[in-house]
Amino acid sequence: MRRTDPGDHGPVRYGPPLPADGLPVLPELAARLAAAAGDAGAQPVGGAPALLEAACGYWTRRGLPCAPDRVAAAPGTPPLLLAVAAALAGDGGDVLVPRPSASWWEPCVRLLGRPVFHVGTPAESGGVPDPYALLETVRRVREEGGDPRVLVLSVADDPTATVAPPELLHETVEAAAAEGMHLVSDETWRDTLHDPHQTVLLSPAEMLPDRVTVVTDLAGALLPAGWPAAVARFPAGEAGERLHARVLDVLTALGARVATPVAAAAGYALDEPDPVTERREAAVRLHARLAAAVHCAVVASGALSRPPCAGRHLYADLGPLREALGEHRVGDAQELEDFLTARLGMPAPGGHRFGDHLGALRVRLDTGPLLDGSDEERSECLTSPEPLELPHVQRALNSLRSVFGDLRDDAQRWEPPR
């Protein structure tokens, strides 16, 4: 079984961050952070009781009840996943992830010196491996002497912005359970469904409560991206207790504490008062419209993209435009990243950042940069009945449409005569 090699093309220290919302900080969150700024005390490793209670309330409202002694907080998901992976696989286990997957999953595991194996996803969605591909990967890893113990997945996915259907998730969870694997479910984007009334999202923890650890980065829907805070929910029972204790040991060794002002804002956000929920719902509606507009521009050019269903991004495959892109000396994902970043004037991380093949012409396109403007202009996007017609948003969208329109025109010139 060929292991996935670390990327050696492009800036090695560049890890695409979570797609930001491009909006001003919610005043109520800023007030909570400012009120705690004078507190020089450090948070305990794993989070203070008030933060853990708030996290328990958050998950209980989503059908995942838990107790504070099965919850841990950290300054962002990377140190949290690093701690969970160290606890679960640090003594010789292997980790499996879907292809593509969030940009920070693989580096966290590789820091432990553990191999990472990618598993293919079905055509309709990313984030959750195809169950048959999962079983085949497990078999081949074991044949080569490996020990697959952990599967990391994401029902509402970064980078593909898709939501895996419950039937697929159930089959994959059953397959992983049959192979004795522990699942880590990244649910950062679960609160950003573009059409929550038509999209069914289930957590693996609802299906396999004793074998799933849930991690959530609050930058997904509750906090600004620059205020790092994440929480993890561990299974009940003795195994969950041991895992929780080992994770706290790793976080202690890392000195990974949530900053006290950020913890105050995080606890307030996790309680989901009206200002937080109203901002979240308005932001989701806004980014759903932006993502739909970007998707239209991408597919009109002849490129491929699944319709975005969650988050503030979409994943585009420009393979059908390969010949036209070749005229611009674009032949792989790094060159495509460089080309689109320069043309669009905003980051366009290539698929190789997410574990995809370097030769595949894929990128993640984020919607947050399309809102770039003054605080007043960005705030207006939340209240306008037609935010896409605001001048600064319209300019950004027109620029993006122009770039992809030019690629379409280039591709048409390359079509053979009929």
Image (cartoon, grey):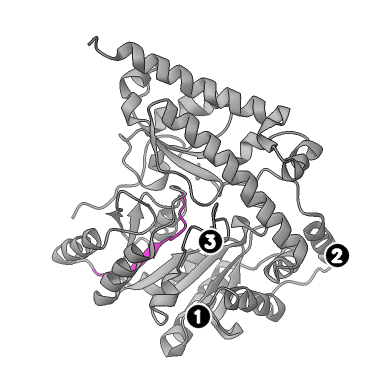
Name which residue type carries label 1.
His
Mark closest to the chain's N terminus, 3 or 2: 2
Q: Is residue 20 visible?
A: yes
Circle 1 sits in a helix, a strand or a loop, which is it? helix
Start-end of magenta stretch: 147-159
Q: Is residue 332 above or below residue 38?
A: above
State the image quarter where residue 371 is shown: top right
C-alpha separation, residue under disc 3 versus residue under disc 2: 29 Å
Please report the residue visible at 44 percent of the width from the left and 75 percent of the height from the top.
205
SS category of the residue bearing label 3: loop
Distance from Cα at disc 1 to Cα at disc 2: 31 Å
Q: Which mark is residue 35?
A: 2
In-image side of 380 versus 358 (left or right)? right
Is 240 magenta? The answer is no
Describe residue 137's horizontal placement relative to residue 159 as left or right.
left
Q: Are marks 3 and 2 in contact (CB under 8 Å)?
A: no
- Which disc is residue 190 wearing? 3
Residue 145 in the image: state x and y as whole percent.
17, 66
Up-down relation of residue 344 to residue 149 (above or below): above
Please state which amino acid type lies under the numbered disc 2.
Ala
Occupied quadrant, residue 193: bottom right
The amino acid sitting under disc 3 is: Arg
Q: Quadrant of the C terminus?
A: top left
Q: Which residue is mark 1?
A: 244
Horizontal side of residue 369 vs 353, given as left or right: right
Locate residue 28, reporting x and y percent: 81, 60
Q: Position of residue 351 (x, y in %)?
A: 40, 40
Q: Residues within 10 Å of mark 1 (few under 14, many from 20)?
A: many
Question: Which mark is on residue 366?
Answer: none
Q: Secondary structure at mark 2?
A: helix
Please name which of the two marks, 3 or 2, marks the residue nearer to the observer.
Answer: 3
Badge 2 density bin: few <14, some 14–19, many ≥20, Cα 10 Å? few
